[in-house]
Image: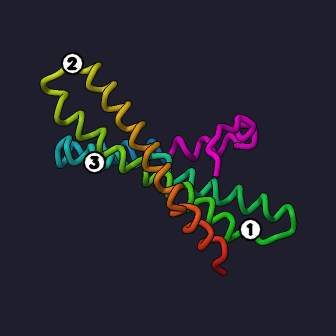
Amino acid sequence: MIVDINFASLKSTKPHEYALRFLFGGILTATAGLIAMRYGPVIGGLFLAFPAIFPASATLIESHEEQRKQRTGYDGTNRGRAAAGLDAAGSFLGALALLLFAFILHRFLPTHDPILTLTAASLAWLALSVILWLLAKRRNIIRHWTARQTHRT
């Protein structure tokens, strides 16, 4: 799989789908805030780290893939699930890299320049995300998992 940016997909996303993503993000952020008020900022921050847009994007990806297959006359259920699964796998790898981001901030923010620390943590997150994706791709983990999901009935 080649990772690329497709600006044409912005046109295919309907306004209500953007609203749904905004709603999910807002609900999850507000929930994290309530948890932080009750249990403290450390616990609340763990919940804020949840990719707020993921639930909405996974369902929209599944729906779009199903519709695309149905327009060609095929049942797109498996294809939609596989596409959402691939998105989930990428989100998981990015979330793993966020652990490194959080560790760097936790360890160095109290004693070092905030801008430098945030920059270093961001670059470390980006580097680890790319490395994890390349390792998963090289070992065919993502492709194997997605193929298994596609061929299920």
Residue found at x 66% / y 76%: 151
Nearer to me, 135 or 118: 135
For label 3, the crowd category at 10 Å Cα-Cα, with few meaning under 14, some 14 to 19 and many 20 or more, is some
Q: Which residue is mark 3?
A: 46
Q: Residue most toward the left?
A: 111
Q: Is residue 17 magenta?
A: yes
Q: Is residue 110 left or right of residue 81?
A: left
Q: Is residue 121 magenta?
A: no
Residue found at x 59% / y 42%: 19
For label 1, the crowd category at 10 Å Cα-Cα, with few meaning under 14, some 14 to 19 and many 20 or more, is many
As measured in the structure, the alpha-carbon distance from the residue carrying label 3 to the one carrying label 2 is: 23 Å
Q: Which mark is residue 113?
A: 2
Q: Residue 130 in the image: x percent, y percent?
A: 46, 42
Confirm or deny contact between disc 2 and disc 1 (CB under 8 A).
Answer: no
Q: Residue 27 in the image: x percent, y percent?
A: 43, 46
Q: Earlier in the sequence, mark 3 or mark 2?
A: 3
Give, as a three-letter code, the residue at label 2.
Asp
Q: Residue 128 in the image: x percent, y percent?
A: 39, 42
Q: Quadrant of residue 83?
A: bottom right
As measured in the structure, the alpha-carbon distance from the residue carrying label 2 to the one carrying label 1 is: 51 Å
Q: Secondary structure at mark 1?
A: loop
Q: Which residues are magenta?
A: 1-23
Q: Which residue is mark 1?
A: 76
Give, as a three-letter code, the residue at label 3.
Leu
Give, as a three-letter code, the residue at label 1.
Gly
Q: Residue 14 in the image: x percent, y percent?
A: 71, 43
Q: Secondary structure at mark 2?
A: loop
